[in-house]
Image (tube, rainbow, N blue to C red):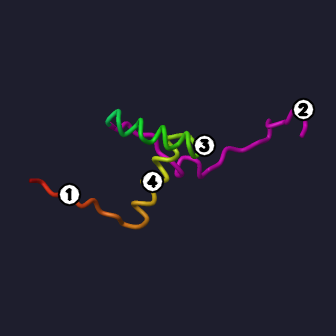
Amino acid sequence: MRAEYDFSKAEKNPYAKRLKKQITIRIENRTIQYFKSLAEEIGIPYQNLMNIYLSDCAHNKRKLAMAWN
């Protein structure tokens, strides 16, 4: 690897803004802790793990089965 790289002529990725969108969402502490501990086991950031999980749900059109009693 080079000691230094010249990025003066580099161009920004025109698709970068389409890849992910930053949002604000309220998630329970125990849910965050669950994903943090799971992410630590796997070795990836917990936010990436949550994104992978939600993307899988969306891709496979999974629906939550809930019963209110």
Query: Separation of disc 3 and disc 1 at Cα?
Result: 31 Å
Q: Residues in magenta?
A: 1-27
Check residue 52 for magenta coloring.
no
Residue beneath disc 4: 53
> Label 3 is placed on what type of residue?
Gly
What secondary structure do most residues of the magenta stretch adopt? loop
Q: Is residue 8 left or right of residue 62?
A: right
**Residue 54: horizontal and vertical position, in percent?**
42, 54
Residue beneath disc 1: 66
Tag nearer the camera, 2 or 1 = 1
Residue beneath disc 2: 3
Of residues 20 and 49, the one nearer the viewer is: 49
> Label 1 is placed on what type of residue?
Met
Residue at (45% x, 60% y) in the render: 56
- Mark sitting earlier along the chain (3/1): 3
Label 3 Cα neighbours within 10 Å, binned few <14 / some 14-19 / many ≥20: few
Query: Separation of disc 2 and disc 3 at Cα?
Result: 28 Å
Q: Is 20 rendered above or below residue 6? A: below
**Residue 11: horizontal and vertical position, in percent?**
72, 44
In the picture as drawn, the residue positioned furthest to the bottom comes out as 60
Determine whether the residue tagged by mark 2 lies in a helix, strand or loop.
loop
> Label 2 is placed on what type of residue?
Ala
Label 2 Cα neighbours within 10 Å, binned few <14 / some 14-19 / many ≥20: few
Query: Separation of disc 2 and disc 4 at Cα?
Result: 38 Å
Check residue 20 for magenta coloring.
yes
